[in-house]
Image (cartoon, helix red, strand yellow):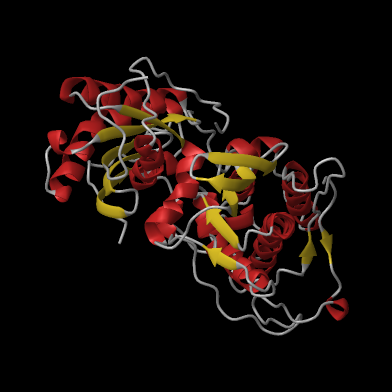
Amino acid sequence: MSSYVSPRASSCILGIETSCDETSAAVVMDGRRLLSSVVFSQMDEHAAYGGVVPEIASRRHVEAIIPVIGEALARAGMELGGVDAIAVTYGPGLAGALLVGLSAAKGLALAAGKPLIGVHHVCAHICANYLEFGDLEPPFTALAVSGGHSHIYRVRDRRTFELMGRTRDDAAGEAFDKVARAAGLGYPGGPRMDAAARGGDPDAIRFPRARFADGPYDFSFSGVKTAALNCLNRERQKLALAPIAVGAWAGSAPDGARAEPGAAQPHAPAPPALTASAPIAGGGAATPVPSAARPPSPETGHVPGAPRPPAADPPGGGLCGDLGYGLPPAFMRDFFAGFQKAIVDALVDNTIRAEMENRTGRIVLAGGVAANSLLRARFAEEAAKLPGVALYCPPPQLCTDNAAMVACAAHGKFAAGEFSPLTLNASPGAAMP
């Protein structure tokens, strides 16, 4: 361990985040007060390939990391010498992307004589809530849900996270992204599906939910993902359309309608110019349900058979185009609404049951999927039924990857004098400490 400074409760920490496709830096005071936050997103560039391309992500991080850190310090009104420590995500994430942030953080720590604090990415997501809710303290039950994680934790204190439930295959965000690509929504799939599901009947198509006797709080989303592809292909068969191949998970489409990620794309958009933003202040088949057997949807109020209100177009495109590659827009809205409901039901039900066991009185949401509008609404509805249980859900800007959460998570380690050596390496599959 490094020991550049004596541990103390007060801290001013520079955080650095490069685990996937956002390059971010932020300065946080005392683990609660945000002085600055800068995020450079590569989302538009990766959208051309249907998902994040690790090599491109690493290259963009190299280009952006120093300007982003400089901007974060400038917005906080300080120089590097004014911070007490430098915190950085060491994993999990993309190996090349993590190494960029780690290399920058270690170099700055060595040059400025500041302690280095390695932070676990999922821990940081959970700690983001401390920035928004000044009264939040452990213990609480936390759901961390993103493109790479779907985990339930019993958080006993700022540094103790006990795993209660996990995904046994795909993460929820991964299932959203893969089904969105297969259905023609593109990347990022989660927010686009959230928008495309509006106006759809979530009870028109019943997707399977997985349960485990040997892991009551565990998740599985591979079965519902397969059921979704089968559902699309059954509808396509009715219209004598070519089936969507399994390769659609990776971006392919029937009749060569979409290029494979990584294939030659001479007309792909050029990399965006560097600009910074400050965002913070169980297997089975899908089963169509007969209209007569369905009550009005509690999420939308839609009565089966009644005209649907117009739905907002998802970001980056309308509901017609190549959505479903030829399937009717009304069916696709019901498809997206039903699929989204299946994912959300599993996340909400397992977390609520975990909290009923924990009896902490607090449920905390974290991660990119926590920005999903249906997930937030369902949690608010279910938490209201539990006397004495408060729900903590950060704003969408704190749900996605950012360095403010990294600096916040590092505060507890700084106060305890728990510093990392300059030999700290990237750990793409890091387990929660």
Q: Is residue 258 left or right of residue 235?
A: left
Indicate the quadrant containing the C terminus: top left, top right, bottom left or bottom right. top right
Q: Residue at x 39, y 29 (%)?
A: 418
- Give the vertical position of 272 relative to 343 (above or below): above
Q: Is residue 311 left or right of residue 4?
A: right
- Please tell me which residue is depicted at 31% across the width and 27% down the height of the picture: 116
Residue 5 falls in image quadrant: top left
**Residue 19 image position (x, y, % from top left):** 42, 33
In the rendered view of the protein, which quadrant contains the N terminus? top left
Find residue 218 and report its horizontal and vertical position in percent. 74, 44
Quick check: can you spot residue 17?
A: no
Front residue of this view, candidates 366 and 247: 366
Q: With 32 as the anchor, is 169 left or right in this view?
A: right
- Is residue 186 visible to the viewer in this orientation of the structure? yes
Residue in view at x 70 percent, y 72 percent? 201
Q: Position of residue 28 (x, y in %)?
A: 28, 47
Give residue 31's position: percent from left, percent from top: 34, 48
Q: Nearer the viewer, residue 95 or 324?
A: 95
